[in-house]
Amino acid sequence: MTKGREPDRKSQSGRTRQGKTLGKVEVSNGFGANTHEPYVEVNWPTDSGSIQLDPDEARLIARMIAEAAEAADQDAFLISFMMDDIGLDFDQAAQIIPRFAAWRRERWDKQKTPSA
């Protein structure tokens, strides 16, 4: 999130954010209905202000953040393509995002499952 910018909590029509969780750390991406900008949201709840991770957990969280950033950019491209090149309004264009997020999740699950 850009410093000084309020988060666009109203992610496009109806929480189509894609998210992953490791323990209490949750990483998700979205596209702002108000700002029309992609974003990555990291929820890292802790009372002490910090958390210790083993190196594998840290790498996994880094991967989760990188994947969410890529997904946010992909969603932004799709919505702007649908609006600018095809002529749909925002609500119509945003309808593709849940389907694309499901496609990404399916591919993620296939990558985690070893081939027989």
Image (cartoon, grey):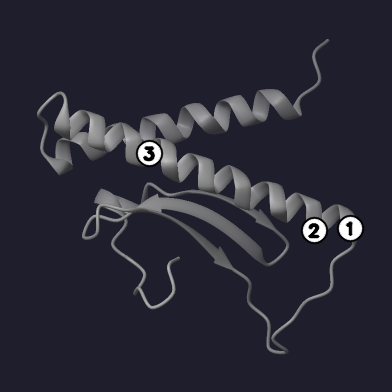
- Rendered position, 104 above or below 17: above
Q: Is residue 46 left or right of residue 39?
A: right
Label 2 amino acid? Ala
Q: Nearer the viewer, residue 112 or 52?
A: 52
Left or right: residue 77 compared with residue 68: left
| Residue 73 pos. (x, y %) | 43, 41
- Residue displayed at 16% across by 25% down: 85
How would you rate the neighbour count of disc 2 (Cα within 10 Å): few for under 14, some for 14-19, many for 20 or more?
A: few
Residue 23, placed above or below residue 95:
below
Closer to the chain start, of discs 1 and 3, is 1
Secondary element under disc 2, as helix, strand or loop, is helix
The amino acid sitting under disc 3 is Asp
Residue 17 or 86: which is nearer the viewer?
86
Of the two numbered discs 3 and 2 on the same chain, state the one appearing first in sequence. 2
Which residue position is annotated with label 2?
A: 58
What residue is shown with label 3? 75
Q: Residue at x 36, y 69 (%)?
A: 7
Q: Which residue is mark 1?
A: 55
Q: What residue occupies the far top of the structure in this picture?
A: 116
